[in-house]
Image (cartoon, grey):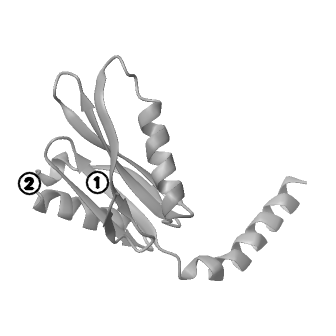
């Protein structure tokens, strides 16, 4: 029984592979209060290597640039800026959304669910289209 389920699953993956062949994923690397990088690509390891390099180019040590989010397919993404009441700040990311509006709504929801006792500000700061192009949030 388990073997037949595995064969069905493997067959489904083989037929689905061409549908994913031209899909792009998106990787986010981030070093709090130092830098961030975003890269799109079909391979997560290559996309993360690119994102970490961009993070380091923006001012952080590459070792401080953590792999924080990967979505495949990439869809629309939101970068959310969060400010703690004590002044530290960081970014969070939500990706894989089918539309720009859905990404904005997800970012707003993420802000609404933050612990308000400690957060002074939270907002969607930037959007990324499915190809990883940065778009200013309105």
What residue would you read off at disc 1?
Answer: 29
State whether residue 46 appears in this view: no
Residue extending farthest to the right is 1
Please tell me which residue is depicted at 33% across the width and 66% down the height of the picture. 135
Mark 2 falls on what kind of element?
loop
* Residue 98 x, y percent position in the rendering: 57, 63
Which residue does the numbered mark 2 point to in the structure image?
A: 59
Quadrant for the N terminus, please.
bottom right
In the rendered view, does 8 fall on the left or right side of 118?
right
> Which mark is first along the chain, 2 or 1?
1
Q: Quadrant of residue 131?
A: bottom left
Q: Please indicate whether residue 36 sits to the left or right of residue 9 in the image.
A: left
**Res. 8 image quadrant:** bottom right
Indicate the secondary structure of the residue bearing disc 1: strand
Position of 93 relative to 87 (above/below): below
Q: Residue at x 76, y 71 (%)?
A: 12
């Amino acid at each position: 029984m388990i073997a037949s389920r595995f064969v069905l699953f493997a067959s489904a993956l083989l037929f689905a592979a061409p549908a994913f062949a031209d899909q792009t994923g998106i990787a986010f690397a981030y070093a709090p209060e130092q830098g961030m990088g975003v890269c799109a690509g079909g391979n997560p390891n290559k996309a993360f290597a690119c994102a970490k390099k961009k993070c380091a180019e923006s001012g952080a040590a590459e070792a401080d640039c953590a792999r924080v989010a990967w979505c495949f397919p990439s869809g629309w993404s939101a970068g959310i800026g969060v400010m703690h009441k004590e002044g530290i700040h960081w970014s969070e990311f939500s990706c894989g959304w089918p539309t720009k509006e859905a990404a904005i709504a997800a970012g707003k929801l993420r802000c609404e669910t933050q612990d308000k006792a400690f957060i002074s500000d939270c907002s969607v700061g930037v959007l990324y289209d499915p190809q990883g192009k940065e778009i200013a949030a309105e």
